[in-house]
Image (tube, rainbow, N blue to C red):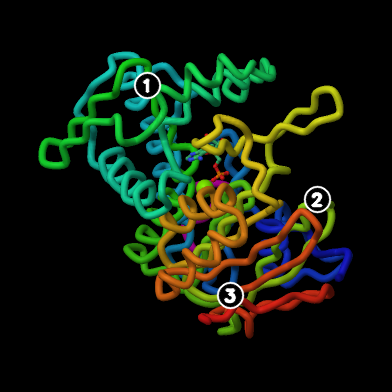
Amino acid sequence: MRKDWIAGALAACLLLTGCGAGAETANDTETSAGSSAQTNTEEPVSKEIFSMDTYMTVTAYGENGQKAVDAAEQEIERLDALLSTGSADSEISKLNAAGTGQLSEDSAELVSRALEINEGTDGAFDITVYPLMQEWGFTDEAYRVPSDSELAALLEKTGSDRLDWDADSSTLALGDGQAIDLGGIAKGYTSGRIMELFDECDVTSGMVSLGGNVHVYGSKPDGSKWRIGVQDPENSEDIAGVLEVTDCAVITSGGYERYFEQDGTTYHHIIDPSTGKPADSGLSSVTIVSADGTLADGLSTALFVMGADRATEYWRQHADEFDVVLIADDGTISVTEGIADVFSSDHPFETISQQ
Ligand code: AMP
Ligand code: MG
């Protein structure tokens, strides 16, 4: 695999700028907001943003590229302020503190999609894992391994079935001791919103990378497909393969993204809601490809928890909605048949077919 290709989003940026080794980096193409009213349709407008605890890059081509990138930045900041559990003022933090609340449009949409995905994945995706995230120290980086009895007490309160959601009034009432966390789905929703803004601004092509989660609008300006690297879970400098796609989200969940080590064991941030512990399903990453960013994000987390067999079964029932690249702990790469033709890798990989 070419060494100058860097994983995920960055790979997409490099490929976007047409960079080979020694060519300009994504940073070099950055155009700061308001710098130029006139945008050459050939030139990308690109901006790096730090929000939602991650580095993001938004890039758009076309006459309205600058307008689209500015609108995307505002949208990212608006959604972060609404959804972040890290800020006490967010709508979600206030809901968690009060135990009940009426949600605004975006939060309501996210809660309702999260509940749908929770049901569809038999609870593998569950926004009520937040108290478990806190107990493991992932919310404040005061990492610790909880005792079995501490986990058992928290599991009593975990479960989306204990939430009382009234879709008509957009009112959510949490069960006793519950708190929610939209971190497993918010970035995909955000990238989906940015695609809507790109559409409204009528950009010719564009892409956004939110901490390695990529969403592309249209094809590249020259009409070719976007090339998006899937990170090698074992080596952040390398990629396991490349996906060539248009108009879709490519969203990865991996245990390598956030973790701590204690006594020789690694504990990562994706919690299996049935055990209260970091999921240990035999997968080291799951990459979902779908036109629906929210779905892609929710499912990347859920299928990581489910493991290869359940994930494959789930895909077979929903093959019209998404495709997936599964990378197992032993390095085995499996790709569903809908994207087998657009995935390439230096490593051998198997194709998961409908039957
Ligand atoms: P992602 O990187 O999309 O897989 O999301 C991981 C984030 O989602 C974590 O940092 C938590 O905030 C949250 N999370 C962890 N486990 C789950 C789960 N089983 N279901 C839903 N959200 C989760
Ligand atoms: Mg996710």
Quarter of the image for the N terminus: give it. Answer: bottom right
Q: CA distance from mark 1 to mark 2?
A: 35 Å
Question: Where in the figure is residue 122, as x and y percent of width and height?
Answer: 41, 49
Please name the residue that numbered disc 1 is placed on: 178
For numbered disc 3, what is the local secondary structure? strand
For numbered disc 1, what is the local secondary structure? loop
- The quadrant where residue 255 appears: top right
Question: Where in the figure is residue 38, as x and y percent of width and height?
Answer: 49, 62
Question: In the image, which residues are magenta?
Answer: 32-39
Please name the residue that numbered disc 2 is placed on: 236
Question: In the picture shown, does residue 130 fall above or below 20?
Answer: above
Q: Per the image, is 38 magenta?
A: yes
Counting other residues with Cα less than 10 Å from the Cα at mark 1, is it few (<14), some (14-19), or many (20 or more)? many
First along the sequence among labels 3 and 2: 2
Q: Are marks 1 and 2 in contact (CB under 8 Å)?
A: no
Q: Is residue 126 left or right of residue 148?
A: left
Q: CA distance from mark 3 to mark 1?
A: 36 Å
Please name the residue that numbered disc 3 is placed on: 336
For numbered disc 2, what is the local secondary structure? strand
Report the residue that reaches farthest toward the left: 168
Q: Per the image, is 121 magenta?
A: no
Q: Is residue 272 left or right of residue 21?
A: left
Q: CA distance from mark 3 to mark 2?
A: 23 Å
Asked whether 25 or 150 is in front, the reply is 150
Counting other residues with Cα less than 10 Å from the Cα at mark 2, is it few (<14), some (14-19), or many (20 or more)? some
Q: Amino acid at mark 3?
A: Thr
Question: Where in the figure is residue 205, as x and y percent of width and height?
Answer: 50, 71
Tell me if residue 224 can be seen: yes
Q: Is residue 100 left or right of residue 341?
A: left
Question: Where in the figure is residue 195, as x and y percent of width and height?
Answer: 41, 61
